[in-house]
């Protein structure tokens, strides 16, 4: 066996990377240089280079009649002024910078026009130079100040003239409730292409639907499975986009409050059949699409005085009342129709009442139809049954047998007696 030096082994161990329990190596805890820090260091290097360059240019060129160290100091002061301007411009908004740059360019052009006028005057050169510098600094400053101050308005003007963008996804997003999935009519509505946009199912709604499908009650379990089948059917529709949202609000409590909070946060509409959820969401200013309200709106309009023919199924609450139902489930309460249970009757509508549970139609029997049909029914009864005296019924289409013909006997003619 080869022996290793303990000091060398200790150094090797000190520089070896620690091994994680899973076997993967982790990086050593060395100081990391982020990209932001690297950019800052590069900026400080550029700033230092600017200071050195301006100081060297002042020392070499000697501006303002200065020589040596004073000239380098003047260059250093100019570099500090540039750095202060940089610090100030860093805090400005982008709209202010763009407006200031545009205003400064316009001011410089205005100063150039003024200098052209000044150059054609007969003033002394010193005076002309003073006015040229004054115009350059004055118009440049005015353009910079006004442009930076009005840059926000310029940005708003540009944005207002842009073409209208497509509406955000949240404007057409619709959140599906557990009740509307269990009901199942939402799939038929989507199949008829009456809903557009994105239909979203939050994760907590899907979890509640799964709990209903796993219930020990057979009825609840059947309803939950039907809701899952409806959701799967909607996912297969090419014209509908169904999306599962992972947003959850643990502090909201039950599913209804979570649904309201999510709809308020993303600006979506709620699709539900729950009456209480509909009221709570409406009070809070949210848009609600209620399938029951849609079904009630699609029911045919019935006006008082119209006649209809219905099948009386059961008796009503009041005496001598009968109850019938239309094809869409609308209840029809008919006065005086208790004796006509399990029979069809002509009804005249007297009033229509719209309630929160749906529409109810009240009517009475059409006596004109009954009176007109009474002779016909009596004639049919007379021809269909036997006579009260026991005489057999006679068919009107059968001819009576003719009586047998009687042969005439030869008649004897007696001669008349003579007159005498």
Image (cartoon, rainbow, N blue to C red):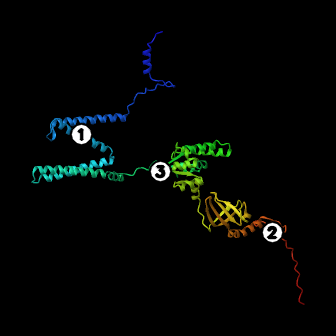
Residue 362 visible somewhere in the drawing:
yes
Numbered mark located on residue 390 in the image = none
Q: Earlier in the sequence, mark 3 or mark 2?
A: 3
Residue wearing tag 1: 79
- Residue at 63% x, 43% y is 213
What residue would you read off at disc 2?
402
Tell me which corner region of the image, top left, top right, bottom left or bottom right, holds residue 73.
top left
Residue at disc 2, secondary structure: loop
* Disc on res. 171: 3
Which residue is nearer to you in this view: 317 or 140? Answer: 140
Residue 326 in the image: state x and y as whole percent: 64, 59
Q: Are marks 3 and 2 in contact (CB under 8 Å)?
A: no
Q: Is 54 placed above or below 268 here?
A: above
Q: CA distance from mark 1 to mark 2?
A: 144 Å
Viewer-nearest of discs 3 and 1:
1
Q: Report if the CB atoms under discs 1 and 2 are less than 8 Å apart.
A: no
CA distance separating discs 3 and 1: 53 Å
Is the C terminus in the top left, top right, bottom left or bottom right quadrant?
A: bottom right
Closer-to-camera residue (408/329): 329
Q: Is residue 296 above or below residue 229?
A: below
Q: Position of residue 195 (x, y in %)?
A: 52, 51
Taking the image as shown, residue 88 lies to the left or right of residue 272, namely left
Quadrant for residue 38, please give it: top left
Q: Callout 1: helix, strand or loop?
A: helix
State the residue at coordinates (18%, 51%).
134
Kind of element beneath mark 3: helix
Total labels: the figure holds: 3
């Amino acid at each position: 066996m080869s022996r290793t030096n303990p000091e060398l082994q200790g150094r090797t161990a000190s520089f070896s990377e620690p091994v994680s329990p899973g076997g993967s190596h982790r990086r050593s805890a060395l100081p990391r240089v982020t990209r932001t820090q690297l950019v800052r260091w590069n900026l400080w290097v550029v700033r230092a280079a600017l200071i050195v360059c301006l100081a060297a240019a002042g020392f070499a060129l000697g501006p303002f009649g200065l020589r040596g160290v004073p000239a380098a100091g003047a260059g250093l002061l100019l570099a500090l002024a540039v750095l202060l301007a940089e610090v100030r411009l860093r805090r400005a908004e982008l709209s202010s910078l763009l407006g200031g740059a545009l205003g400064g360019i316009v001011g410089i052009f205005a100063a150039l026009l003024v200098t052209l006028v000044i150059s054609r005057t007969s003033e002394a050169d010193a005076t002309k130079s003073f006015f040229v510098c004054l115009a350059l600094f004055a118009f440049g400053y005015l353009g910079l100040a006004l442009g930076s101050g009005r840059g926000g308005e310029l940005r708003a003007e540009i944005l207002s003239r842009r073409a209208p963008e497509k509406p955000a996804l949240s404007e057409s997003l619709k959140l599906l409730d557990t009740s509307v999935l269990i009901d199942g009519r939402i799939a038929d509505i989507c199949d008829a292409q009456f809903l557009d946009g994105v239909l979203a199912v939050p994760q907590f709604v899907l979890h509640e639907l799964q709990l209903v499908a796993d219930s020990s009650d057979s009825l609840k379990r059947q309803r939950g499975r039907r809701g899952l089948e409806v959701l799967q059917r909607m996912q297969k529709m090419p014209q509908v986009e169904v999306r599962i949202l992972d947003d959850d609000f643990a502090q909201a409590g039950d599913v209804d409050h979570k649904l309201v909070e999510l709809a308020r946060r993303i600006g979506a509409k709620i699709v539900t059949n729950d009456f209480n959820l509909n009221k709570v969401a409406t009070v809070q200013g949210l848009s609600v699409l209620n399938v029951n309200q849609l079904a009630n709106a699609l029911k045919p309009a019935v006006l008082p005085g119209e006649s209809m023919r219905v099948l009386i199924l059961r008796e009503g609450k009041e005496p001598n009342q009968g109850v019938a139902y239309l094809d869409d489930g609308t209840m029809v309460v008919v006065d005086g129709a208790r004796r006509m249970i399990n029979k069809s009757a002509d009804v005249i509508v007297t009033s229509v009442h719209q309630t929160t549970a749906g529409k109810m139609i009240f009517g009475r029997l059409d006596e004109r139809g009954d009176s007109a049909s009474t002779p016909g029914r009596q004639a049919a009864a007379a021809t269909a049954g036997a006579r009260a005296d026991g005489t057999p019924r006679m068919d009107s289409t059968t001819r009576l047998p003719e009586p047998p013909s009687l042969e005439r006997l030869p008649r004897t003619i007696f001669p008349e007696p003579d007159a005498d």
